[in-house]
Image (tube, rainbow, N blue to C red):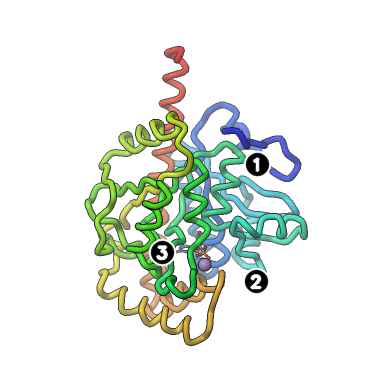
Amino acid sequence: PENRMNDHKLLTISADVRDALASGQPVVALESSIIAHGMPYPVNVDTALQMEDLVRSHQAIPATIALLDGTLRVGLNREQFEFLGTKKDVWKVSLRDIPYVISRKLPGATTVAATMRIAHMAGIRILVTGGIGGVHRGAQSTMDISADLTELSQTPVAVVSAGVKSVLDVGLTLEYLETWGIPVVTVGQDQFPGFYSRESGFPSPLRLDEPGAIAHLLRVKWELGLQGAVLIANPVPAKDEIPFTEMEIVIRDAVAAAGKNRISGKQVTPFLLQFIAENTGGKSLKANVAAVKNNAILGATMARLLSDGERSRQLAGQ
Ligand code: PSU
Ligand code: MN
């Protein structure tokens, strides 16, 4: 990729991630907004560490991304996880916040959009998250559409998710993904998943059942020079899901409460997630943890397939 800048002073890559990238080993990028703004302590830190362990036990190197001490950090240590998970004023950093937060040397946790861009700078091609941001319910009047979507349209990093955030307008988000030329692939079922539920009520634009087939699609897309990402939707495991109709009731209440409290901008997602966790007696949090761990495993598998494919092509002299 053209804009790799892995020797830049504003980009700090941990030693294990740097070694893995240099030797062509699989690396998986992980976002940090879910730690600072998506889950309560200590579940946030525990989950982040468990995701890293799962990536490692599936033979890939994890690289959680955040902004600390005035640099973009790729690969965090234990204290840095603890810091992001406990400190109150960690910035939620989307793409547009990067220059401000770095120039002021503020601590920042990255959304999917910012994590994708930084992963690409470092040369990482697979990112794992829970649910991506997208078109919010009522976006016809609020224009609340996440920068995750525009980022997916231009940065070549595949994003493994359990669908889009359940609080969004899933139908409008799928339309937007189509407009911007972003392939959406659901693993193993015809329906696009609904994050906490395996169902969303919408068919998936594409379905592939094998990680190998998805890796092949990624290679073809990027070999053709087609810009942007692929959204991989990996349904939450059946034993951990919350039925779609049950979730919908809570989500509608959450969206109404956000409107009533005049929550706007980047506060919207954290507000809704907290409301939902409280109003499902923690069940949503459990489903969220199960989904992201499931995604970490698929992400590691995808990263390994991509790097194995490259190595065998190099050996064949192609
Ligand atoms: N989905 C979750 N928890 C989260 C997020 C999404 O279940 O914390 C975060 C992700 O980092 C995502 C971001 O990229 O919210 C989107 O925020 P916004 O809609 O403000 O762009
Ligand atoms: Mn928004």
Residue holding disc 2: 88
**Amino acid of disc 1:** Ser
**What is the CA distance from the residue labelled 2 to the residue labelled 1?**
25 Å
Q: What element carries label 1?
A: loop
Residue holding disc 1: 14
Q: Which quarter of the rendering shows the N terminus?
A: top right
Q: Say which residue appears at 35% left-offset and 58% top-offset.
A: 175
Dot 3 alpha-carbon crowd within 10 angstroms: few under 14, some 14 to 19, many 20 or more: many
**Amino acid of disc 3:** Lys
**What is the CA distance from the residue labelled 2 to the residue labelled 3?**
23 Å
Q: Say which residue appears at 28% left-offset and 63% top-offset.
A: 200
Residue 268 visible, this orientation: yes
Q: Say which residue appears at 32% left-offset and 57% top-offset.
A: 236
Residue holding disc 3: 165
Mark 3 Cβ and ligand 1 under 8 Å apart = yes
Residue 238: x and y, percent? 25, 59
